[in-house]
Image (cartoon, grey):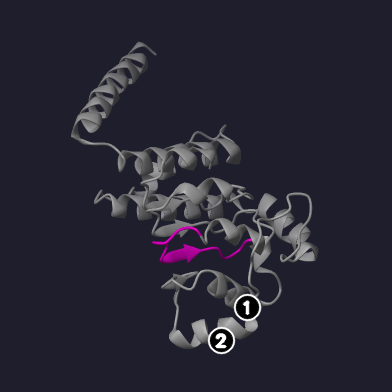
Amino acid sequence: ISICRDLPNIEVITFSVNGISDLEPLHRCQNLSELYLRKNNITSLDELFYLKALPRLRVLWLAENPCCGPDPHRYRMTVLRNLPSLQKLDNQAVTEEELSQALVDGVEITAPPARRSVENGWSESSTSSTAGATTEPRSELLSCSLEETNKTQEELDMKPVPRDKYSSFSPQETDCSHKKRNNVLNAILLLMKELDAEGLEIIQQTVARRLQAFQKELQEE
């Protein structure tokens, strides 16, 4: 996620299922409009402090993080009190009534999180939530990664990735290598949005050479 410090113009970020706990690198992404952070390790709602500086943020998916805690109403009200410009939170449209209620039921976040303690989050639930993430079924990891990658490709007007292409890992590969490969693909697709025509041509030429080399290796084997 630290790469976001160098991407001030990025508009859509999908970082679901990545073990992310720190949102500080996002505060420079002033053009960010959609942020997908589902199923990470964000333990404190104080992390919203860094998102308050993003004037164009309209869509946020933060569900299934430890910071959501045992009280869905308090969680949603706190997010909306601090990010009143949101139009959709966790795939649910934000209403005017909710924004008004958030001023009463939500907790205002005025300072960045303390890295060694959880203040506004629910620390008692973070252990079980984190444990659940480590035992997440391999098929669910694959499904989430495929969903997020296809979302990214839709933003780039590209064809969705067929499931059989995403499932073509060798039996020896671990869940970690699955996630790494999927995360690299997501990062590449997002970075492509930052390139101009000349940059895309360079990418096209590099990919063509890499494919030729890969095919030659397969033929030799």
Q: Type of residue at label 1? A: Gly
Residue at 52% over, 59% down: 51
Q: Residue 90: x, y in percent?
A: 50, 69
Mark 2 → mark 1, Cα distance in angstroms: 8 Å
Per the rendered image, the range of residues in magenta is: 53-65
Pick the front one: 150 or 162 = 150
Under tag 1, what secondary structure?
loop
Q: What residue sits right under mark 2 in the picture? A: 101
Please name the predominant secondary structure of the magenta segment in the image. Answer: loop
Residue at 30% over, 54% down: 155
User: Within 10 Å of the Cα at label 1, are there few (<14), some (14-19), or many (20+) other Cα atoms?
Assistant: many
For this orientation, the residue located farthest to the top is 220
Which quadrant holds residue 121? bottom right
Q: What residue sits right under mark 1 in the picture? A: 106
In primary-sequence order, the first of circles 2 and 1 is: 2
Under tag 2, what secondary structure?
helix
